[in-house]
Amino acid sequence: MNYGDLVVRKSYGGDVTFRVEGVQQNTAIIKGTDFRLLADSPLGDLVRVPHPTMSERTKQAQIKANESLSRLQKDRQEQSERHLADLRTEWGTGEKGYFDVPGKVLHLDGDPHYLKKSLTLYNQLRVPAEGYYVNESSMAEALYRMLPRVRPDIVVITGHDGVLKRRQSHDLYSLDSYKNSQNFVQAIQSARQYERNLDTLVVVAGACQSHFEALLQAGANFASSPGRILIHALDPVYVAAKTAYTSMRETVNMNDVLHNTISGSQGVGGIETRGSYRIGLPRLNDLSTLKVTPSVS
């Protein structure tokens, strides 16, 4: 078994495709290719799969990811049409007589591979975003430093998490039963020390099997995972992008968050939250074609 090999676990019926991150004696450290899951597994439980081959669960996740992206793009088009209609009615201007001011995202990720995927999707969706790879245990301190500098509208706090299997009895109410939920709670608290208003700074937090209730209680607007399930790597991006392009005069459509994220209502939930999107007038000029007479010598 080598670094970078794609594998599935026999004991789990090959339900999730992983990439080997390292091998220590007879144990491999494996990371989900599409799900935010970091695990260890006996080498004897792993089966290599060819690169074009994906588990059925991974295939379904990719289908759902494409559907979620299509829905976001469709919503964006419908929103643009509504804005044009409103502008004609309220201000008598038409065509593309405005410019977009979507919410700005600060994304902290405990996984550099997922961060790269996330930033690519933000760019594709035209969401202004800064992203940084930060170990989960260092996120609270990183936010203390970054928030005053970046001044985002939305902060995403994600990485790896999970219910610890070494616990003989899984007390799902206890943060001690989770790999990184306590770190996410501390990061959220750091964000709320910077900005308490839930609509001025929207917090999206959590990863696979995170302590959903504790994250909300700490001050998150949206969090994982109500059903303690594996969430898709791009679920936090979907929620952040949805918020970034929802008008500040409206609340984020919770039905979309619950049912159009890749992991569904047991993967992500949250509370009623205003969007961060604004329109600006008039339409921005192409300065390369603007003819200006200088007025200062």
Image (spheres, rainbow, N blue to C red):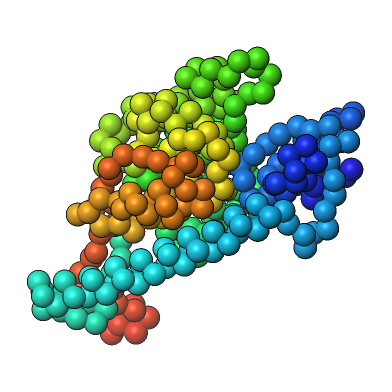
Q: Residue at x 58, y 32 (%)?
A: 161
Res 109 → quadrant? top right
Residue 55 % position (x, y):
72, 53
Give the answer, above or below, for where 283 lies relative to 119.
below
Of 270 and 122, nearer the camera is: 270
> For this view, does 150 lie left or right of residue 43?
left
Q: Residue furthest top?
A: 168
Q: Note whether residue 74 is visible.
A: yes
Q: Residue at x 72, y 49 (%)?
A: 17
- Quarter holding the N terminus is top right
Q: Residue at x 59, y 27 (%)?
A: 163
Q: Note whether residue 175 is visible.
A: no
Of 203 and 32, nearer the camera is: 32
Residue 190 % position (x, y):
40, 27
Res 32 → quadrant? top right
> For this view, does 203 lie left or right of residue 273?
right
Residue 182 % position (x, y):
50, 23
Residue 264 % position (x, y):
47, 48
> For this view, does 192 lie left or right of residue 260?
left
Of 290 and 138, nearer the camera is: 138
Q: Residue at x 36, y 40 (%)?
A: 270
- Quarter holding the C terminus is bottom left
